[in-house]
Amino acid sequence: MSFTLKISNDHNDRRLDRTLRSVWKWIPLGEIMKAIRKGAVRVNSVRVKDPGVHIFEGDELIVPWPLREEESKNYFSELGRIKIIFQGDNIMIINKPSGMLVQPDTKNGDSVITRIKGVLKSNSPAAVHRLDRNTTGVLAVALNGSALRAMEKLFKERNVQKKYLAIVEGSAPDNIDIDAPLLKDSENNIVSVNYEHGLKSLSRVKKISGNKKYSLVEIELLTGRTHQARVHMAYIKHPIIGDHKYGTFRADKKLSRPFLHAYKLKFPDELPDVLKEIQGMTFTAPLPDDFNTFMKNNSLENLL
């Protein structure tokens, strides 16, 4: 089980190890230091191995320890419901929040799928595709094995239109196709452009609005590689703001995640029987509050 803590002003600009010791008082210091050394502690999804690194208000701190035994008994019953956009007999479309994994990384850990299983009282739900922990928006979930196999085939053959909105650094091009093969380093969970060994990766980018400092862009993923939108935007020198892994600077200390939102899934007009309930349908998810607030404060408009 992992636990996520949103850093408040009480711990703003404080050392990581001191914050851990003050919040998880029942965890021995030796265990805390060991977890840091092994990269089991993450700040904004990035593994941090330096106990002296400073964390700031708004950061998300993720640790591997369970809650106190007396608190953990009711933990999963209080996780809360996921916002459902559509629910049929075979498919569920949800609006994924930031800060949550799609699949649990530990047994019974918090995740989109864990919560859906709790609501439906079923072990069958399975994610059809993936969104990063801090990416928000539309996510398709199969509710049984037949639907999962049909949906996996649909995504593998690239018959589902996937569009994202992102706020990026600088004045982005009005329209650009990014054809840059990507190679994943699984050990370090990082992706890079590699023309010799990478897999074909294609993104279509359109600027929606912008100024000299920031741009709101629509990104259509024509392939579905890990971290594709984030790496491709960084590759053309317009990284997604808040992206501490692939970005070039921290636009605002309060930005604890990449401003990337999966806003649209569009399904084809002809589908097999098990997927008829979503045939020809388009699903969208509204922008989250932090995304809208940043746009308002920086004179960006959603003109779609």
Image (spheres, grey):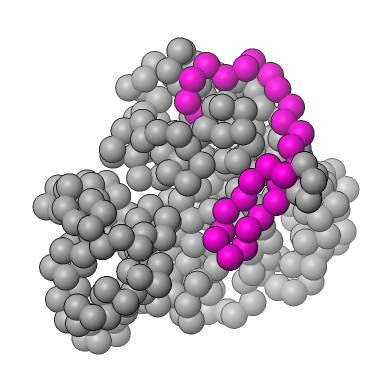
Front residue (pair 126, 298): 298
Measured from the top left, where is residue 111 in percent x and y?
Answer: 47, 67
Q: Is residue 268 magenta?
A: no
In screen coordinates, is 207 left or right of 145? left
Give the quadrant of the N terminus: bottom left
Q: Residue furthest top?
A: 212
Front residue (pair 72, 145): 72
Q: Is residue 220 visible?
A: yes
Residue shown at the point (79%, 68%) measured from the top left: 149
Front residue (pair 293, 19): 19
Measured from the top left, where is residue 76 in percent x and y?
Answer: 37, 76
Q: Is residue 190 magenta?
A: yes
87 lies above or below 119: above
**Number of residue marks:** 0
Please tell me in which quadrant of the rendered image residue 103 appears. Answer: bottom right
Measured from the top left, where is residue 241 in percent x and y?
Answer: 44, 34
Residue shown at the point (45%, 13%) measured from the top left: 212
Residue shown at the point (48%, 37%) measured from the top left: 247
Residue shown at the point (23%, 80%) measured from the top left: 30
Please tell me in which quadrant of the rendered image residue 81 appears. Answer: bottom left
Give the quadrant of the C terminus: top right
Q: Which residues are magenta?
A: 168-194
Measured from the top left, where is residue 42 in percent x and y?
Answer: 37, 61
122 lies above or below 282: below
Please tell me in which quadrant of the rendered image residue 38 appears. Answer: bottom left
Front residue (pair 202, 158): 202
Q: Is residue 279 visible?
A: no
